[in-house]
């Protein structure tokens, strides 16, 4: 029978091994490295949002936002439109929560992990979260206290934020 100390040592060694196998990207950002499908989905959705809403919203891929005493980096953050002051000081993390945070699920992530992240977003005042699943080509729209809406064809509609995007443009 192993002692508690031996179990702690084994767990520590397993953790160190798992950390040593992570890429620099994963260590730096605390999330899995994106796949081709993930990257293309992120680009397509960002472009579809920009084309339709560039005067209503500002769309940021990979923007660091403050969540209380921690930070997070949604795949896409959507803010009410404002003019960017080029050359002005650019904070490392934005304190104001976005209206919409989009998370694109990577193959190594679970829905449970993403749901925990979404609940943290809601607790910080984010009004809407989209969970995008490239492998299934679906988008789920979540709002605090409401049942998720999942879209597999047609328009992805988010009535809280006022956004519609054709699903075929996201997964083309």
Image (spheres, rainbow, N blue to C red):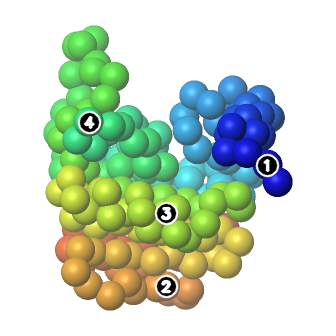
Of labels 1 and 3, earlier in sequence is 1
Q: Is residue 4 left or right of residue 85?
A: right
The residue shown at (49%, 85%) is 151
**Which mark lies nearer to you, 1 or 2?**
1
**Which mark lies nearer to you, 1 or 4?**
1
**Which mark lies nearer to you, 4 or 2?**
4
Task: Answer whether labels 1 and 4 touch (C-beta < 8 Å).
Answer: no
Report how far apart the C-alphas of labels 4 and 2 lie in the structure: 34 Å
The residue at which mark 2 appears reads as: 151
User: Whole-percent x and y of residue 110?
Assistant: 61, 66
The circle drawn on residue 114 is: 3
The residue at which mark 4 appears reads as: 69
Q: Secondary structure at mark 2?
A: strand
Q: Secondary structure at mark 3?
A: helix
Of labels 3 and 2, earlier in sequence is 3
60, above or below 101, in the image: above
């Amino acid at each position: 029978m192993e002692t508690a100390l031996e179990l702690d040592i084994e767990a520590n060694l397993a953790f160190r091994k798992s950390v040593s196998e992570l890429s620099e990207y994963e260590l730096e950002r605390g999330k899995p490295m994106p796949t081709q499908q993930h990257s293309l989905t992120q680009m397509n959705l960002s472009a579809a949002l920009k084309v339709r809403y560039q005067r209503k919203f500002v769309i940021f891929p990979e923007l660091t936002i403050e969540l209380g005493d921690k930070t997070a980096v949604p795949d896409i953050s959507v803010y009410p439109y404002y003019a960017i002051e080029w050359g002005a000081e650019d904070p490392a993390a934005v304190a104001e929560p976005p209206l919409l945070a989009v998370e694109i699920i990577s193959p190594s992530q679970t829905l449970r992990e993403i749901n925990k992240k979404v609940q943290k977003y809601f607790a910080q005042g984010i009004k809407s979260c989209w969970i995008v699943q490239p492998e299934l080509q679906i988008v789920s729209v979540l709002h605090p206290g409401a049942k998720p809406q999942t879209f597999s064809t047609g328009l992805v509609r988010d009535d809280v934020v006022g956004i519609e995007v054709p699903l075929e443009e996201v997964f083309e």
